[in-house]
Image (tube, rainbow, N blue to C red):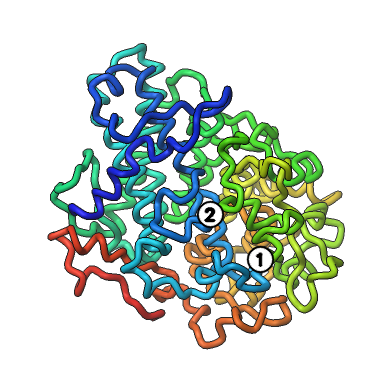
Amino acid sequence: MKKIFNYMMAGLLGCALLTGCADDALETVPTDSMSGSGLMANANAALVPLNGIYRSMYAAGWSVGGNEHQCFGISSYALMADVMGEDMIMNAAGSGWFWYDCLYQVKDMYSSSAWRSYDLWNAYYTWINNANYILAAEETMEGNSEDVNYVIGQAYAIRGYSYFMLAQCFARTYKGHESEKCVPIYTEPTIAGTQGNPRATVQEVYDQITADMDKAIELLSNASERKHATHIDLGVAYGLRARVALTMEEWQAAYDNAHNAIDASGCSVLSVDEFAGLNDVTADNVMWGAPIQSDQSGMYASLFSHMDWEMGAYGESARKQINKDLYDNIMAPNDSRKAWWDPDNETNEDNGYQQEKFKFSDYQTWLGDYVWMRVEEMYLTAAEAACMLGNESAAKTDLAAVMSERVTNYSTNKTGTAMGTTSSQRTGSLREEIIDQRRIELWGEYGRIWDLRRLHQGFRRTAAMGWPQDALLTTRPTDNPEGYMWVLTIPQSEFDGNVNMDQSTDQNPMGDE
């Protein structure tokens, strides 16, 4: 593991130290101070390395050796997973950022430190390693119990979340693939020269994820008050646990944790015009996100640069548009979310409808906060879980909590859980209705491909939807959710240093099947 962990150590804690500390910015620490005796001595000091982890979750470029304009942390990975599906159309290659994700042409670049395999592996393992350094001080950290719980609880949540995302990127989805190889597990700090671990199974990794998330919830249930919007508090920990349970098809756990997240967050569903632009973490429906300071803006290397066409950046040259079938035929005519897209934009031409959901809050300073979790997601998660549990009344209640703010006098008499083999094959079931609303509500935020995979559902791209010819994927098996088309290759750097991983047996398939 020597080589890959050298990369991880380079990001240690202060991979985030790319800016000074504004009044509301996170205080971080230089990279070479990670194991300093004072940093983990008490809970107050440990906030500094903790903040370093969070800062790197929205800082651009540190996780890769190039292509940094498509690598800016959590929001870039959600965008990546959205353009891999059918609902977010890229109308052109533009400067190339995210285009190769959209075309599924990144797997053969596993030997480069500038592409997606390396980016994701390095980012999430850096966060895991940094969290492990904090967790190593769990028994010795001084301070009152609420402050210690606040720090240690977040470290468990960060580690569990990171393994969850690694599992989704580098292995097939949980259900039905539990015994397959996933990713190596590390629960102690690593340094250059650390003996590498072999790939654990999907089940073993999800066991680690759930254990970490449950421990985080236990500690954060008795922790001091949240100190920054980027911090994972109890509500967010419940929300992340709900995401995991949804993927594992543990419906009762998904339902319970989603409702616990709603209650703990204190957030409220908002009407569309109350959070226009999706760029403000202080909105009452935002559970988790990153408030971006003027000296922390990634400028071109940012979410809004890729989304907001009016800035004249990548959002103009490679426009992000909605699937016309989703907009025209699935979204209700009086759905207020139609304001998130412009079907009359003169540049749409034969492609999809231009997005207006994500907008800079200040064009002069390239500002716009990153939103990572909204309470609306939790209601939709609870609705799907209740539907799968056979409690359709509860499912419709949770669905209506969101839809009453989207469609006047919304109601549905749909029933059942049937889903099409592909998303284009319609069943008219209640579960399909919930998923449809999730597709619309979380467009650009969650990552469509993650839902398609856990639903064991394929997809089609067509010109009628608005997809350009170059991105139709007509020769690729997009209708096979059990294939390896969406499973990334492991970076070469891992095999170069890990004696417990054999490239001939541990590398993921290069092909689609």
Q: Quadrant of the C terminus?
A: bottom left
Mark 1 vs mark 2: give the one in front: 2
**Which of the two residues, 3 or 223, is positioned nearer the viewer here?**
3
Cα–Cα gap, marks 1 and 2: 32 Å
Residue at figure coordinates x 82%, y 52% from the top left: 336
Residue at figure coordinates x 85%, y 62% from the top left: 333
> Residue 67: x, y in percent?
47, 60
Query: What secondary structure is found at the residue carrying circle 1?
Result: loop
Q: Amino acid at mark 2?
A: Ser
Residue 503: which numbered mark, if any? none
| Relative height, residue 198 to residue 151 (above, below) | below
Disc 2 crowd rating (10 Å Cα; few below 14, some 14-19, many 20+) is: many
Q: Amino acid at mark 1?
A: Ser
Disc 1 crowd rating (10 Å Cα; few below 14, some 14-19, many 20+) is: some
**Which of the two residues, 160 or 80, is positioned nearer the viewer here?**
80
Query: What secondary structure is found at the residue carrying circle 2?
Result: helix
Residue located beneath label 1 in the image: 429
Residue located beneath label 2 in the image: 76
> Residue 323: x, y in percent?
70, 70
| Relative height, residue 245 to residue 103 (above, below) | above
